[in-house]
Every structure is written in structure tokens, then in C-alpha cells.
Image (cartoon, rainbow, N blue to C red):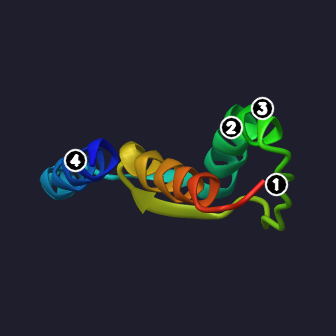
Amino acid sequence: MNSLLETLVAISKLEALETLSKDQIDISALTESIIHDVEKIYQQKHITLTTHLHKDIFKKAHTSCSIIIKNILDNAYKFTPE
């Protein structure tokens, strides 16, 4: 239940960000950085992350789009068996 509330709060924050300015962000570098941060947690559960990211993928977005990437990786971790 706590995870659901955290997700709802995150979605609410993202919706509020629609009015904020957006910058060109290297989505591939951001994703690689986040994956690097969570790899140790995945290893504890004996899960190997395999990625096929293209380099230099730029998108005009707010820097908090990392919340979305982290949420996807968090869900993958939670719902992948050891």
C-alpha cells in the first residue's frame, strides 16, 4: 500500500511539472546513470540488468523525468523473481 501511495505522489508531482521549463536532456546518459545506481540492489536478488541503449538520445524534458525511469526499474525489480 505504501508503494502505491508513493507512486501516486510521484505522478502528482509530475503532473505539476508540466508548467515548468524543459531542457534538452540526454535520456540515454540519464538512464545509464540510474541503472548504475540500482545495479547493486539488483545483484542482491541475483538479477542481471542488460541494456541496449543508443548513445546521445536527447529529448526536451524536465530533469525530474528520472522519476519515471526509476519507477520503471523499481517495478521491474519488485516483480522479477530471483
Three-letter residue code for mark 4: Leu
Nearer to us of marks 4 and 2 is 4
- Residue that appears at 77% across and 42% down: 45
- Say which label, 4 or 3, has the lower sequence index: 4
Relative to 49, does residue 30 appear above or below in the rendering? above
> What numbered label is drawn on residue 61?
none
Residue holding disc 3:
40
The reply to whether the C-beta atoms of the residues labelled 3 and 2 are less than 8 Å apart is yes
Give the CA distance from mark 3 to mark 2. 6 Å
Give the CA distance from mark 4 to mark 3. 25 Å
The picture places residue 68, in percent across and down from the top left corner, at: 43, 56
Give the CA distance from mark 1 to mark 3. 10 Å
Disc 3 on helix, strand or loop?
Answer: helix
- Say which label, 4 or 2, has the lower sequence index: 4
- Say which label, 2 or 1, has the lower sequence index: 2
Which quadrant holds residue 27?
A: bottom right
| CA neighbours of label 4 inside 10 A, class few (<14), some (14 to 19), many (20+) | few
Give the CA distance from mark 2 to mark 1. 9 Å
Give the CA distance from mark 4 to mark 2. 21 Å
Residue holding disc 2:
38
Q: Is residue 76 left or right of residue 18?
A: right
> What numbered label is drawn on residue 49?
1
- Residue that appears at 35% across and 50% down: 62
- Residue that appears at 83% across and 67% down: 52
- Residue that appears at 68% across and 32% down: 37
> What numbered label is drawn on residue 5?
4
The picture places residue 22, in percent across and down from the top left corner, at: 32, 52
The reply to whether the C-beta atoms of the residues labelled 2 and 1 are less than 8 Å apart is yes
The picture places residue 13, in percent across and down from the top left corner, at: 19, 47
Nearer to us of marks 4 and 1 is 4
